[in-house]
Amino acid sequence: MTAVLKDEAAPIRSEEDVVRVRQRVRQAALELKFSLVEQTKIVTAASELARNTLVHGGGGTMRIERLSDGSRQGLRLTFDDQGPGIADLALAMQDGYTTGHGLGLGLSGSKRLMSDFTIESRLGQGTCVTVTRWR
Amino acid sequence: MPAITLTRLAEILARHQDDVLRDWTTQQLKSATRRSDLLNESDLRENSRQFLAAFTAALQRAKGDDITGSDWADVREILTSISGSRATRGFTPSETAMFVFSLKEPVFDRLRHEIKDVQPLAEEIWGTTTILDKLGLLTTEVYQRARESVIKRQQEDLIELSTPVVKLWDGILAVPLIGTLDSARTQVVMENLLQQIVDTGSGLAIIDITGVPTVDTLVAQHLLKTVAAARLMGADCIISGVRPQIAQTIVHLGVNLGDVITKPTLALALALAFKRTGVVVSRNAALTAQV
Amino acid sequence: MDRIPILKMGEFLLVTIQVDMHDRLAMTLQDDLMEAIRARAARGVLIDISALEIVDSFIGRMLGNIAAMSRVLDAETVVTGMRPAVAITLVELGMSLPGVRTALDVEKGMELIRTSTRLLEGDDRRAQG
């Protein structure tokens, strides 16, 4: 069973916060001794999801958790907002679909960059995306 | 199967922890699987003390025998650490599991002392043996995973040594891939190639798969991703040594090579690379006449 | 840092991105570059990202925009120095940066721009003559 060894939260309310999110996630990935390529993938996924939270979710929070599952370690990031929510999840997960001016790769791309990906969203209530990368 | 009762065990261990620890340690020191060559007495005492303390504490908290729950997290961590350290010292997984199983005897002795009725005694012994079996098996799992990660690291080192990136000419690199490729190995080689492209400032890389008997979808995809990454960086790749069987596999797998250039041999790939970089090779007529 | 500096090197403009940019800074760079191309009648823009540890879809889009907009202003853009880890991640992310030309370093980038503009102008001359 997975044990949570460390838990920290960060606000996502401004563009500067998104930069801070990248730095904190990079730090956490370094501590867990992920390889350089893995670190880059994790921080990039975090950047995409944090921006989504800010731009589409109207701001929210990120949680960083360090997990231990027997002998392997993992990094879990949770992005939470109380924004308008996503109407059609399947559509949102398609490459290229965007309701803004982005490339539409944030959700589908982050899924490819991480080991595990889950998303919950309710119209009018908000969105919560959880991604994990195992070593 | 009857539900596991551990309540009396929890209470008895809490009261008699020191006695049980003493008996257990003495027994371990006398046992045939002692391995005093690998583990000294003070470390053995410390391991036992830590484990028994955590085990007793977990029993107070736990509502059942599910050792995967959060109540048992401390015990799992201690066992993982003991298991890992013993594996490094050279203990076999059975020897490490024996560490946990050997706790049964002193605990059963204590239970027989404290519980006089046969039925409750039988239930507590059953509960004890079930939980210690699970914990003992956990150590073997941890051992397996530790060994696997050592092997994986050694494999990665081997890969780096066995698949060197060579410089064929100014600005032209080559990676001769030999043997069966698996996903992990291909990834390591490809990351290495991309780094070499940057370090040497080479705009062209030839990936030669003459020595590769078969290619599966994952490997083909890794190759294509490497070419895509090299292009993003400003370099280009040529895949050479594509044999007819591999060409067939690629088509059957539905992998789309897109506009990736392939050449049947490394020589032809090199010729193309020269052409692209403006290198001209000519033969000196005077020298060949002498031969 | 308020703005990212743009250096003029002959007919080229050179931008070296060395900070982790927040989105506003990236948009400002875009605007500043377009103004600089116009003001200096530059033929080429070199964006060196060798110090960038991360390129996400926002930055990718910025690079694509710069390439497209500069082309309209008759200038070629080349992005140089992309790190291997970044390239691997972009491929996994699904970004191919279409319309963005790349080179391993600034020198090769300048060479690339010179060669392509030479070819284009060669065509023009042949068409006229």
Image (cartoon, rainbow, N blue to C red):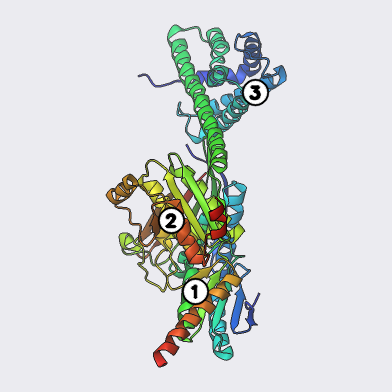
Q: Which amino acid does label 3 sit on?
A: Asn
Q: Mark 2 lies on which chain?
A: B
Q: Horizontal placement of B124 versus B86: left or right?
A: left
Q: Is residue A127 visible?
A: no
Q: Where is residue B144 in the image (x, y as percent from the top left)?
A: 51, 28
Crowd band around label 3 with a 10 angstrom C-alpha radius: few (<14), some (14–19), many (20+): some
Q: Which of marks 1 and 2 is in front?
A: 2
Where is residue C48 drawn, in percent x and y? 59, 71
Q: Residue A104: in sight, yes or no?
A: yes
Q: Which one is in front in this view, the residue at disc 2 or the one at disc 3?
A: 2
Mark 1: amino acid: Met
| Residue B224 point in image, percent of width and height | 41, 55
Identify the residue at image location x=55%, y=79%: C45
Q: Distance between the residues labelled 1 and 2?
A: 39 Å
- Residue position for label 3: B47
Instruction: Give the SS element for disc 2.
Output: helix
Disc 1/disc 3 C-alpha distance (Å):
58 Å
The chain carrying label 3 is B
The answer to whether dots 1 and 2 both sit on one chain is no
Label 1 lies in what chain?
A: C
Check if mark 2 and mark 3 are on a common chain: yes
Quadrant of the rendered image containing residue B29:
top right
Residue at the location (58% across, 11% down)? B106
Q: Which of marks 1 and 3 is in front?
A: 1
Query: Pointer 2: what residue?
Result: B268
Residue at 45% in and 56% down: B269
Name the residue tied to disc 1.
C62
The correct choice, above or below, for A104 with respect to B61 in the image is below
Which one is in front, B95 or C111? C111
Q: In this view, does B156 lie above or below A37?
A: above
As displayed, is residue A45 above or below residue B24? below
Q: Distance between the residues labelled 2 and 3?
A: 64 Å
